[in-house]
Structure formats: structure tokens, C-alpha cells
Image: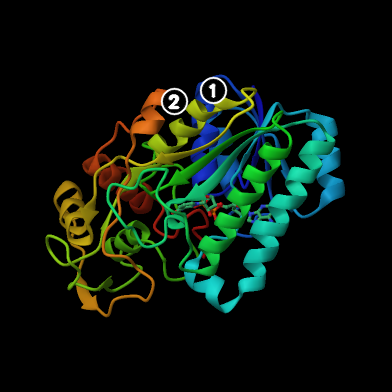
Amino acid sequence: MKVLLTGGAGYIGSHTYVALKEHGHEIVILDNFSNANRLVLDRLAQLFQEKVEHVEADIRDRSTLDDVFEAHKPDAVIHFAGAKAVGESATDPLKYYSNNVSGSQTLLEAMDAAEIRNIVFSSSATVYGVPQALPLTEDHPLSSTNTYGATKLIVEDMLRALHGADPRWSVAILRYFNPVGAHPSGEIGEDPGGIPNNLMPYITQVAVGRLAQLKVYGDDYDTSDGTGVRDYIHVSDLAQGHVAALKLMNTGTCTPINLGTGTGYSVLDMIKTFERVNEVSVPYSIAERRPGDVAANWADAQRAKELLGWQAQLGIEAMCADGWRWQSRNPKGYDQTN
Ligand SMILES: NC(=O)c1ccc[n+]([C@@H]2O[C@H](COP(=O)([O-])OP(=O)(O)OC[C@H]3O[C@@H](n4cnc5c(N)ncnc54)[C@H](O)[C@@H]3O)[C@@H](O)[C@H]2O)c1
């Protein structure tokens, strides 16, 4: 298929580019580089010895989207573009409504006009709110505990309404759990600006000496060791999940699907495994719980297996080893002059 990746220069998008290429798909990246480094394009080009087809544009720019659909005529869109920091969504909510909600609406309008009605959407396990039961199945009630989550839920609702009104649309709503790690080449990986919001880049930046100490937010949760438990999934597995989700294109269905491993690990499990596998130390201290964090969540990963024939292959050791390979080879991320 020919696939347009909005936000394709970002962390998950760049790994999905690799997985799609390996399966012989044709790809165009559309990204405004608001949270990505242009050097990622060079790395992707090196991996495949081929120029990366890309457009620098914002998904809110309707006329550019029209031009891109006219010029490239993609069969489907995988829609990663959006802002994703929970904390920032509390202090700058309009950025989230504009980028995530308005941006998605503009994209869908342009797709409809171009008669491209196949979309894979990056949603998140955050749409389950506070878990009422574990593991989380796709039928768990939906709610939001923060503005970022609210925008994901609104876009999910928009997609369900669109499909309800016009069943020519094929929609795969992928609810990611906690993507970590990096491509095994060490050439691409997660490169957040500022203090990382997520655990793995925080661990790798402490291990590489960019940050002095990791803060573990809360050790008094009702979990085996008191620290938060999450379903970490290797980003390469997640990327393969997108390749598999293309099976749902041109089916006239609208389906939410969890992409997780089905297993939860605590923060301390992650730190200890990272130290053991990579033979590095990660000093940490215990800090207050962060408001809005839940004690534990992990996925029921059955639907992805049944519908897509996909299941995660890589375990916690590979997540830790690959995350470290990326960071140790690129201590400052993509731009070593930072
Ligand atoms: N990383 C996670 O933990 C996680 C978990 C669940 C869901 N998601 C969702 O997956 C998607 C990808 O996440 P990621 O971790 O790769 O994030 P990322 O920030 O690395 O990638 C997002 C990309 O979108 C681009 N972008 C942002 N706004 C844009 C706009 N208006 N127009 C064009 N490009 C724009 C950014 O420059 C960036 O390259 C996001 O929608 C995110 O909400 C991520």
C-alpha cells in the first residue's frame, strides 16, 4: 500500500516507517517537526539507502493536505501527529485541542474530500481512565483523567461518528500501552526535549550521565513493590502492530484495538532489569506520587491477536538493551551539538 504517515518523523512514526518499508509498503511522511529532529530523516535514509519521501507541513493546513493527497494519492493514512505531554496539556490545553482535535478534524475532512477513507489512529490506553478491572479490554468504559486523554477520546468519538455516518470509512483505533526501547540498529530512538515525561528515556538519560538521578514517583501503591505497574511494549513490536492494522483497511469497519504485551512490570522491575542487562547503574530516589497516575494498568492483548494476527515478540530485556544502545550511541539524541 501507499501510506501517509502524519507525525512520521516522531518516535513511533519513525519506527513504523522502518516496519512498513520492511514489508514493501510505499511511504510519505508528513510532519511539522514541532517535536522531531530533521536528522531522523537522514538516519532513515541511511538504514534503507534511499531518500525518505517527506513533506514538512502541519496537519491543520488544509490546502497543503489537499495538495499532498492529490500529488501522492495514498491508500491509507496512519495518523501519529499530535502533542502528547500530559503535564503540558494541563497548562496549555488549547495547544492540545488545536493540534490533536482540530488537526485530526482537518485531516479527516481533507481525506474525505480526496476519497481516502482508510485511517489508522494513534490512541492511547489513557482513554480507559482509572482502571475498574485488569487486564483492560477494549470494552472497558472510556473516560479521561487529563486534557491529553480528553483529546484522544474526542478524536476516537469523531472517528466512530464518521464511520457511523459513512460506512465506507475503515478505521483502526490503536490504543497503545507504554512504548519503550528503540530500533536494534541504535540509529533511531526516543529523543525528548527537556526532562523526559516517560520512564525509559529518563532511565537512559540518567545512565548516560545527562541527568543525575531518576525520580520514582510513588512507592506506596498497591502493587508488588509499591511502585507503579505498566504494560511496556517494545516500539518495534508496536510498529509491527501498525503494519498488521493495515489489514483492516478497505473493510468498512471501525475497531479499537489494544497494542500491549498483556504483562505489567513495575518501575523497579524496569530499573533493575536495565541495570542487569546493560551493566550500568541508574541511581534513583523516591518522590511523591504524580497526580493522575494510576497504580497499575496492563492490556488484554487478545483482540489484536485474533483480528490482526499480531502479538508482541520482544521482552523486557530487549526493551532495556535496545533503549540503551540508542542512548549510549547518541548521548544527546539526534543532535550531538545540543
Ligand atoms: N509515546 C507514547 O508513550 C504514546 C502512548 C500512547 C499514544 N501515543 C500517541 O502516538 C502518537 C505518536 O507518539 P510519539 O511518541 O511518536 O510522539 P512524537 O512527539 O515523537 O511524534 C509525534 C510527531 O508528530 C509531529 N506533529 C505534532 N503536531 C503536528 C502537527 N500539527 N502537524 C504535523 N506534525 C505534527 C511531531 O513533530 C512529531 O514528529 C501521538 O499521537 C501520541 O499521542 C504515544
> Is 200 in front, or is 104?
104
> Is 331 in front, or is 284?
284
- How far apart are labels 2 and 1 at the CA level? 9 Å
The answer to whether mark 2 and mark 1 are in CB contact below 8 A is yes
Q: Quadrant of residue 267?
A: bottom left
How busy is the neighbourhood of tag 2: few (under 14 within 10 Å), some, or many (20 plus)? some
Q: Where is mark 1, residue-wise?
A: 247
Residue at 72 percent of width and 32 percent of height: 117
Mark before the other along the chain sequence, 2 or 1: 1
- Secondary structure under badge 2? helix
Amino acid type at circle 1 is: Lys
* Residue 195 as seen in the image, left or right of residue 85: left
x%, y% of residue 81? 62, 50
* Residue 53 as seen in the image, left or right of residue 124: right
Q: Nearer the viewer, mark 2 or mark 1?
A: 2
Say which mark, if any, is on residue 112: none
Q: In which quarter of the image is residue 222?
A: bottom left
x%, y% of residue 235? 40, 42
Asked if the beta carbon under badge 2 is closer than 8 A to the nearest atom of ligand 1, the reply is no
x%, y% of residue 276? 14, 51
x%, y% of residue 157? 61, 50
Asked if the beta carbon under badge 1 is closer than 8 A to the nearest atom of ligand 1, the reply is no
Q: Where is mark 2, residue-wise?
A: 307
